[in-house]
Every structure is written in structure tokens, then in C-alpha cells.
Amino acid sequence: MKTKETMAYTCPACGGMLAFDPVSGKTKCESCGSMYDAKEVEELQAGKNADVAGEERDDGWKAYGCSSCGAELMADANTAVIKCPYCGNNTIDPTKFAGSIKPNAVIPFAVTKEMAMQKYRQNQEGMKGFFLPGSFKSGSHIKEIQGVYIPFWLFSGTGYIDGEYKVSNEHREGDYRIIERYEARRKGSLEFQNVPADASKRMPDDLMDSIEPYRFSDLKPFSMSYLPGFLAERFDVNENESKKRAKKRVEGSLDDAVEKTLSKYNHIDKKNQTMEVEFDDTAYALLPAWILTTKWEGKEFLFAVNGQTGEYIGNLPINSGKYTLTLILSFVLPFALMILVLGDPITAAIVAAIVAAIVGFAVHSAMKPVAKATSAAKYVEPSLDLSEKSDHFVKKDKVYEPQKKDGDK
């Protein structure tokens, strides 16, 4: 099969391979150490390797010829940057980021591979390390961590909410529970900016949500000079599909914002509200992440480090023996203590069960922290811009609930 050349970023001083350096924020020669900024690299590459489209195969993969050593390289249709295993050349297919599918912006890597590896190690120490299976903690695979530019859609606009709420406050007066009921009305809007939705089918949404937030003040106009040395993908989730995810997150933030305006009430008893989300601007950006995939007992575990902020996330396997023993001790020890203090086995069992449940939840939360985002809290205005707000007292209920006194059974 005939393959066409890809674009190679080479040093004009010595001909060595160029790679983006997260520490300096410039492109660096791996051989002589020469540094170049984005504009210089683009000017150096202007006119080079104009014919770069790979040969498409029937199975959806593409064959490329390495522009350094001539080796044939294979990649799927969405992969734009690959590293030649023979000569180390950073092989780039610029047609993946051209014309209408060219990203608007990129956040360059600021976290190095060594820093990402350290984050991975640190998050397997302490309590997490205790509950990890011993065979999983082998560090030999950590070097396989890869820097990847993940495609994202970024959405900006305004969310609107209009709702009526039945709310109440409760307090006690002697043997009575007093319930004061109100009807509240809230109508307002909330502006949002750069709500992200990853546009790669291969990246789990909850994993990408969990390494947020990115600082979008660091967005730079897209340049392929930031890509050498890292993998990069083209989007394969379209804008409209991603917009649905962003809409749900904005709606979650609208709901949270309304609840803040009702915080003086003890309870929100009923909601009747409508929400509308208007998108004013959409951007296509590449955001940096360090990704590590490892397997244990036939299961795949995926870990990610935010390539800009260093935020680490990933679910860890749990040593079932240690976990079970911890739950048993979390029940037995409080139970024995409560028996000595109270002498009541039923109360002691209830307290011990609550303690064990709390411990179990804490361990599980620490070992399984990945979760899909339900709001856009990091990308919205801090409070709802209210156009209408009203609270009307409805009635007061007085419920007879005598409090137990000492000696009562």
C-alpha cells in the first residue's frame, strides 16, 4: 500500500526532533535543546510536507509513512498525532485539524510526564495504599502514561428558570411541632461560559468531568506547534450530541442557584419549574490530559491527570479481604463500647451499624472517586440574576408531638 508523508517538526539547527516542553511553554529540540515559540515553529514549517493525507483502508484505519525513517505507521481515522516506534519521530497528520474541523483553541500542557507519574504514585499512598491489592501497586507500568490532547466542545450562553415552590420552616414549641408554610416564586437567569464536554468516544465522560476544572484563561489560538511529543485526537462526538450534556449541567446549576435563594427555609416541599438554555457561542478546543490504562484481574482501570492543573482522578481496585475486615472491626468495636456505656444491645447494634456504614462509604468514596458532573458550577455566574422574587405566607400547622422525658419508655 502506498502511503503519503506526514508532517515532521524538526529542529532547523541540528535536524533533531522537536517536542513541546510543558515547563518552558515552548517547542524544544530533543537533541540540541534549542527552543522555539509557536510562531517560530509555524514559520519554520510553512510550506513543508504539503501532501500529508494518509492512505485510508477499508477497515477505517490509515497508513502513514514516517517522514523521518520511512516506516509505515497505522492509526485510526481520529488519531492525529502518533510517535514512530522506530525513530521516535513525532508524526502529525495536519489534515485532521484543517478547514472546518480545525480547533479554535488549545490549552498547552503545563504538567510534565514526571509530574503526572508522581501524582499517580502519591494517590496510591496512605489509606488508598492500604486497601489496594498488593499486586496492583507495581510501579513498572507507570512509565506507560501518555500525554493526550483530548477534543472538547466548549459552550457559552444563558440559562433561564421560572418556578413556583412550596416551602416550609419547622421549629418546636414545647410538645408541639410548628410548621410554617409558604409559596415562593423565582424567575431569573444565569450566564455560563466554556462549559466543557469531551468529544472523544474513547474517553469516559465521568473521567473527563472529574479532572475539571480547566482554567480557560490559558486558552491559546490553535497551533500544531503545541502537538509534537503528545498524542492528539480529532472529535468523533458531534457538537449537537455534546450540547445535550452541557444543557443538563447548566440545568443542574440553575436548580442549585434557585435552592440558594430558598436557603432560609428548612424544606422545599414541591417544585414546579421550567428551564430553558440558550447557547450563544461554541468553541472546539484541545485540552491536555495524561492518561494511563492498566489491567488487574481482567478488568481495565483508567487514570487521568489534568495536563494543566495536575488534578488526578481514577477508580482503584479494593482488596476485598482488608475491606471486609475493616467493616467487621468498624461494627464490633463500637458495638462493644456501646454495650459498656449503655448496656442496651439494640441501641449498641444501631450505633455500630451506622459507624460501619460511614466507614464503608468513606473507603468506597476514596477508592472510587470518578463521577459524572451534574452541574456547571465552575463555569457559571456565582448567583442567579433574579427578575422576579416573591414569598407568601400560607398557613401555620401545629402538630402535637410530646417530647419524651427522662424515665419515659
Image: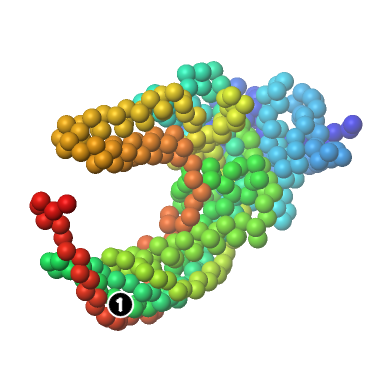
Q: Residues within 10 Å of mark 1 (few under 14, many from 20)?
A: some
Asked if 48 appears above or below 400 in the picture, the reply is above
Image quadrant in which the N terminus is located: top right
Horizontal relation, residue 267 to residue 303: left or right: left
Please name the amino acid that badge 1 sits on: Tyr
Of residue 225 and residue 169, the one placed in the foreground of this image is: 169
Residue at image location 23% in from the left, 71% down from the top: 399
Asked if 327 appears above or below 137 in the picture, the reply is below
Residue at image location 47% in from the left, 18% down from the top: 134
> Mark 1 highlights which residue?
182
Per the image, label 1 sits on a secondary structure element best described as strand
When asked about the image quadrant of residue 90, the answer is top right
* Residue 36 percent coordinates (x, y): 57, 35
When asked about the image quadrant of residue 288, the answer is top right
Residue 186 appears anywhere in the view: no
* Residue 217 percent coordinates (x, y): 46, 52
* Direction right: furthest residue: 1
Asked if 343 appears above or below 190 in the picture, the reply is above
Horizontal relation, residue 306 to residue 235: left or right: left
